[in-house]
Image: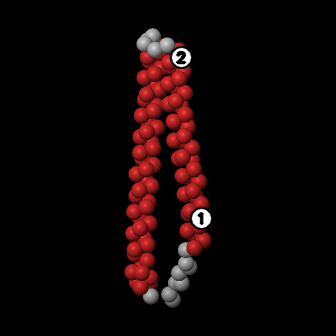
Amino acid sequence: MFLVDDILLAPVRGLFWIFKEIRDAAEEEQANEAEAITTKLSELYMMLETGQMTEAEFDAKEKALLDRLDAIKERAADGENEEDEEEVVALKRRPKRRVKS
């Protein structure tokens, strides 16, 4: 009986795996984007310190980069909340297996 269940659920598990891989790739891309923004902020601070940029230019560029960084962090936090909710729902729906004696 369990073999039949495994065969019937294989396509669903395959799709679930594909969606999980897509989500992981998107999260990695967000992390890389956040890292790039942090690097750009460091460059801006260096340019300000060396006098290559005025205070007004710095403030405008810093605000734009910080806004993008905040948006990335909010998306990541929303994704974690959704993931936790999905795990709870999956646990509730999981069929209980009987142990053969």
Q: Residues within 10 Å of mark 1 (few under 14, many from 20)?
A: few
- Element type at mark 2: helix
> What's the mark number on residue 55?
none
Residue kind at label 1, given as amino acid type: Val
Q: Quadrant of the N terminus?
A: bottom left
Q: Is residue 86 above or below residue 61?
A: below
Who's the residue at 53% across and 47% down the image? 76
- Residue 45, x across and y down, in percent: 47, 20
- Tags 2 and 1 touching, CB below 8 Å: no
Q: Residues within 10 Å of mark 2 (few under 14, many from 20)?
A: few
Exactly how many numbered labels are in the figure?
A: 2
Residue kind at label 2, given as amino acid type: Ala
Viewer-nearest of discs 2 and 1: 2
- Residue 72, x across and y down, in percent: 51, 41
- Element type at mark 1: helix
Closer to the chain start, of discs 2 and 1, is 2
Q: Quadrant of residue 9?
A: bottom left
**Alpha-carbon distance for marks 2 and 1?**
48 Å
Who's the residue at 51% across and 36% down the image? 68
For mark 1, what is the residue?
88
> What's the mark number on residue 56?
2
- Residue 87, x across and y down, in percent: 56, 63
Q: Is residue 17 above or below residue 73?
A: below
Q: Is residue 48 above or below residue 93?
A: above
